């Protein structure tokens, strides 16, 4: 027997229903906020993520699914290209924004995406190697009200889904100017403990010391207890921006907690960074992470354009839904189940449900020649609103029995009239 690769899983029909309902809710909110869908390739040139997500990140250093393919159309040359399964959606969306000149449209551009991402991580509850993200990216405005709009969008989704104990943490990770200053102060301060830091932090020391503040290693946490926080060294523009974002969040009555150590694991962030946490789902409690990335469009070859967005991990969101005992409204009962007893009856009902389906009704019938009792059980399992029953007696009379499953009322209707009756009756 062949199993799914480690860190991947099948979504079976019952579970797929939950996904569809969740996706419908997310699409509904996108429409409300006038955010439009973008679909980008599942794999991109490796370069995109190296430059977009950042060389010093865990994603690029350890977690990418990368493969090299020789260009078969060009077999005599040494033309080998490196591709990577997308580990996240921001870099691809920025690439698409530039490639397709979306900056030429009225701004801001508000995009969303939903789909599989790939990271080679150690699997555990809420952490998979293939996982799904719903993300949004907004380009073309650096006004602090759009930061609050993006955060409030996520907040509305969690509220609508009945996820009660969600916590919002925010921080500002500044701009290259204040970051450079902070980096120097940080390196001076941490120089004496550098040797005691974990290998990851030792690597980050020169390239991106800010990430040391976010290390989950207990020893590093202790050693950096008094490390200088970027929030105390923000330049006046970044400080003002951060304060304005808070003002808008307060106006929207969205509770938040400022976490000065929140730096996020991707290199592109500037100014606002935020995460939504839901503790019931365990160690992998961050269900949503995002922030502003004002330099990324330019860094990937476009014009200087501000951007902000977030991504929600859908597996984690579904775990949170289960833990909050939230069931999304499921209106999956079918309209008609046709019960047939005997070969000729099967012909008659197949014709009827064929016509009913053409008129837009959801129908099912028995295909296993089961007993009346077993077919009725199937109708109940599928939450059928009506059943059509045709046996030998009905065939002889040219009439079908239509049963309203809610009221248990039954009527004999001539074969010719069944479709009309049900179209009127089940609307
Ligand atoms: P991220 O924090 O790397 O950000 O991922 C966002 C969310 O994806 C996480 O909070 C988590 O819910 C989910 N996630 C990440 N890795 C896994 C995994 N291995 N298994 C299951 N779920 C996972 C980004 O990806 C940024 N692109 C977000 C963003 C958009 N920032 C600005 N725009």
Image (tube, rainbow, N blue to C red):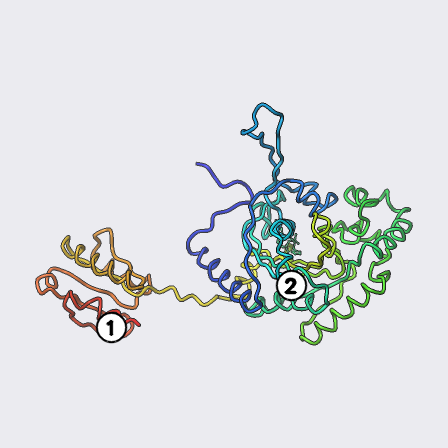
Residue 41, position in %: x, y? Answer: 55, 46
Q: Is residue 258 left or right of residue 99?
A: right
Q: Is mark 2 within 8 Å of ligand 1?
A: no
- Circle 1 packing at 10 Å, graded few (<14), some (14-19), many (20+), is few
In the image shown, does 236 or 216 lie closer to the viewer?
Answer: 236
Q: Is residue 128 left or right of residue 358?
A: right
Q: Secondary structure at mark 1?
A: loop
Q: Which residue is at a point 69% across and 51% down the rendered structure image?
A: 302
Q: Secondary structure at mark 2?
A: loop
Q: Quadrant of the N terminus?
A: top left
Which circle marks residue 337 in the picture?
A: none
In the image shown, does 47 or 168 lie closer to the viewer?
Answer: 47
Q: Which residue is mark 1?
A: 408
Residue 107, position in %: x, y? Answer: 64, 63
Residue 66, position in %: x, y? Answer: 62, 37
In the image shown, does 39 or 413 lie closer to the viewer?
Answer: 39
Q: Which residue is mark 2?
A: 108
Residue 254, position in %: x, y? Answer: 67, 72
In the image, farthest residue toward the top: 76
Q: Is residue 398 left or right of residue 162?
A: left
Between the C-alphas of marks 1 and 2, the distance is 56 Å
Give the answer, above or below, for where 124 lies relative to 391: above
Residue 287 visible at all: no
In which quarter of the view is residue 259 placed? bottom right
- Circle 2 packing at 10 Å, graded few (<14), some (14-19), many (20+), is some
Give the answer, above or below, for where 425 lies relative to 205: below
Q: Quadrant of the C terminus?
A: bottom left
Give the answer, above or below, for where 203 lies relative to 71: below
In which quarter of the view is residue 350 placed? bottom left
């Amino acid at each position: 027997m062949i199993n799914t690769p480690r860190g991947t899983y099948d979504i079976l029909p019952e579970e797929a229903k939950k996904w569809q309902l969740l996706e419908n809710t997310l699409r509904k909110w996108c429409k409300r906020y006038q955010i439009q869908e973008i679909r980008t390739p599942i794999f991109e040139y490796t370069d995109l993520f190296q430059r977009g997500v950042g060389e010093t990140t865990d994603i690029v250093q350890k977690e990418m699914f990368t493969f090299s393919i020789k260009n078969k159309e060009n077999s005599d040359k040494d033309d080998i290209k490196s591709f990577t399964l997308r580990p996240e959606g921001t870099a691809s969306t920025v690439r698409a924004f530039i490639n397709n000149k979306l900056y030429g449209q009225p701004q801001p551009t508000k995009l969303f995406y939903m789909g599989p991402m790939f990271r080679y991580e150690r699997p555990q509850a809420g952490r998979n190697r293939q996982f799904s993200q719903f993300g949004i990216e907004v380009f073309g405005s650096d006004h602090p009200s759009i930061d609050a709009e993006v955060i409030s969008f996520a907040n509305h989704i969690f509220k609508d889904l009945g996820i009660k104990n969600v916590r919002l943490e925010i921080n500002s990770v500044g701009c290259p100017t204040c970051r450079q200053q902070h980096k120097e102060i940080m390196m001076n301060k941490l120089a004496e403990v550098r040797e005691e830091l974990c290998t990851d932090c030792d690597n980050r020391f020169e390239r991106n010391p800010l990430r040391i503040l976010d290390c989950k290693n207990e020893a590093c946490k202790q050693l950096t207890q008094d490390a200088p926080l970027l929030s105390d060294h923000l330049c006046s523009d970044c400080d003002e921006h951060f304060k304005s974002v808070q003002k808008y969040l307060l106006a929207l009555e969205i509770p938040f907690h400022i976490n000065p150590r929140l730096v996020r694991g991707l290199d592109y962030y500037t100014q606002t960074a935020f995460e939504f946490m839901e503790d019931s789902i365990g160690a992998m409690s961050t269900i949503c992470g995002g922030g502003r990335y004002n330099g990324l469009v330019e860094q990937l070859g476009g014009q200087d354009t501000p951007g902000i967005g977030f991504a929600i991990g859908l597996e984690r969101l579904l775990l949170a839904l289960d833990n909050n005992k939230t069931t999304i409204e499921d209106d999956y009962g079918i309209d008609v189940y046709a019960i047939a007893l005997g070969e000729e009856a099967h012909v008659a009902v197949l014709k009827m449900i064929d016509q009913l389906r053409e008129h837009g009704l959801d129908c099912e019938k028995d295909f296993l020649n089961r007993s009346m009792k077993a077919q009725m059980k199937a109708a109940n399992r599928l939450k059928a609103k009506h059943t059509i029953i045709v046996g030998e007696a009905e065939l002889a009379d040219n009439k079908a029995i239509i049963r309203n499953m809610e009221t248990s009322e039954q009527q004999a209707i001539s074969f010719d009239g069944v479709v009309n009756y049900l179209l009127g009756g089940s609307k």
